[in-house]
Image: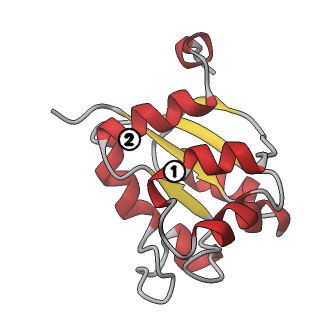
Amino acid sequence: MPTNRTFTMIKPDAVADGHSGAIIQQIESAGYKIVAIKKVLLTKEQAGQFYAIHKERPFFESLCNYMTSNVIIPMVLEKGNAVQDFRTFIGSTNPELAEAGTIRKQFAKSMEANAIHGSDSDENAEIEGKFFFSEKELEQRL
């Protein structure tokens, strides 16, 4: 059964380009409630842990370097059918294929610098959210 929470993070390129506020505004305007939010500068070790599933892939090192190049803004969001609906809302990983009006169509530069992450399953949303936020932070209501 789908949960009502998902995990997202605004990526270094979008933060550096000053798009964080616009992205957060669109997320809230679409009816997502922000349960937890913070700014984080990932270390190489943290990036490697978060993306461990890709460790054997040729882009792993580049991905870790990119994700540590500037702060990110991780968030846990709440809304009905949060995971699937949010992935549709942000658009295709490849911004050239993203639907008009999606976050990635508006703000992404490339497949790697694609402005925002969205969890791909309820299970991963929980794992990813707990990577960045404590239980206490996830119980808060902002």
As drawn, the residue found furthest toward the bottom would be 96
Along the line of sight, which residue is nearer the eye, 109 or 28? 109
Q: Secondary structure at mark 1?
A: helix
Q: Nearer the viewer, residue 84 or 22?
A: 84
In the image: residue 113, left or right of residue 126:
right
Mark closest to the chain's N terminus, 2 or 1: 1
Which percent across, then down, holds residue 137?
62, 17
SS assignment at label 2: helix
Find residue 36 and report its image quarter.
top right
| Residue name at image x 40 percent, y 80 percent | 99
For the N terminus, which image quadrant? top left
- Say which quarter of the image contains residue 134: top right
Residue 35 percent location from the top left of the image:
55, 27
Count neighbours of disc 2 (C-alpha within 10 A) and say few if under 14, some if 14 to 19, many if 20 or more.
some
* Amino acid under disc 1: Ala
Answer above or below: position of 79 versus 12: above
Depicted 140 relative to depicted 74: above or below: above
Residue 139 in sight here: yes
Distance from disc 2 to disc 1, alpha carbons, whole Å, reads 13 Å
| Quadrant showing the C terminus | top right
10 Å crowding of disc 1: few (<14), some (14-19), many (20+): few
Q: Indicate left or right for 48 with 119 as reference.
A: right
Does the rendering let one see residue 78?
no
User: Residue at the spot x=59%, y=72% of the render?
Assistant: 114
Residue at 28% over, 31% down: 3
Image side of residue 29 versus residue 65, left or right: left
Mark number, residue 52: 1
Q: Given this view, does label 2 or label 1 mark the residue nearer the observer? A: 1
Picture residue at 47% right of the left edge, 64% below the top: 90
The residue labelled by disc 2 is 124
